[in-house]
Amino acid sequence: MFISVLYKSIFKDFAFLVLRVFSGALLIHHGFEKLNDINNFADAFVRPLHLPFPIALSYLAAASEIGGSWLIILGLGTRLGALAILGTMSVAIYHALVTSGFNIYLIELLALYFASAFSIILLGPGMFSADYVIREVFIAKSNPFKSFPKNKPTTNYFSNTKKDSSLNSKQKKSLAFPFSSFLSS
């Protein structure tokens, strides 16, 4: 029992913390490098893709890397920050493929940042995050209707059996769309 409590709650959430902090800390300097010479970044990376407003998009890329990194490090609006990073990494991977073909040395770091942001979006920030504290302390504790049932029993019009229409709440939650809340789940 003691091992399962530690394994399920602490180690998994600690792994999310490590993923968030290392991904954010290692990615944040890329945004600051873009800000050091924004015109050079626009000439080298945005203009070859023939995107409009290259300077503005360069500032947007830098802001998403810096702001998104801080959000995932702190665990505050984590999924929103990871979504910003995911968008920037998608464009960067596209740029690498268009300009250099499939060069694994250019794509590998971008793919790792993409995978970590994608994982954070799908799995959430974990227990060691500001999102978790906000959700548990401020939202869950202050809800006066928490003791009332959330879902009314529904009738399944496509099946005649009660077994099909009576999914328990855990199964319903597992089928929920992962982006329904940007706070931790």
Image: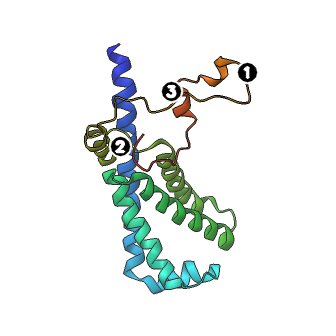
Mark 1 or mark 2: name the one nearer the start of the chain. Answer: 2
Nearest-to-viewer mark from 1 and 2 = 1
With respect to residue 104, does 56 lie above or below?
below
Q: Is mark 3 on a helix, strand or loop?
A: helix
Q: Name the residue under label 3.
A: 170
Q: What separation in Å lies between label 1 and label 2 (alpha carbons)? A: 46 Å
Q: Name the residue under label 2.
A: 17
Along the line of sight, the residue nearer the viewer: 154 or 93 = 154
Identify the residue shown where x is 66% and y is 73%. Answer: 99
Quadrant placement of the C terminus: top left
Q: Quadrant of residue 18?
A: top left
Identify the residue shown where x is 35% and y is 57%. Answer: 71
From the top left corner, tell me how far across and down residue 80 is, in percent.
Answer: 44, 57
Identify the residue shown where x is 51% and y is 33%. Answer: 173
The amino acid on which the numbered mark 2 sits, given as a three-letter code, is: Leu
1 lies left or right of 142: right
Q: Mark 1 points at which residue?
A: 160
The amino acid on which the numbered mark 3 sits, given as a three-letter code, is: Lys
Q: What separation in Å lies between label 2 and label 3 (alpha carbons)? A: 25 Å
Mark 1 or mark 3: name the one nearer the start of the chain. Answer: 1
Identify the residue shown where x is 37% and y is 66%. Answer: 66
Q: Which mark is residue 133?
A: none
With respect to residue 78, does 184 lie above or below?
above
Q: Is mark 2 on a helix, strand or loop?
A: helix
10 Å neighbourhood of mark 2: few (<14), some, or many (≥20)? many
Q: In which quarter of the image is residue 43?
A: bottom right
131 lies left or right of 62: left
The amino acid on which the numbered mark 1 sits, given as a three-letter code, is: Asn
Circles 2 and 3, Cβ within 8 Å, touching? The answer is no
From the top left corner, tell me how far across and down residue 77 is, in percent.
Answer: 37, 54
27 lies left or right of 102: left
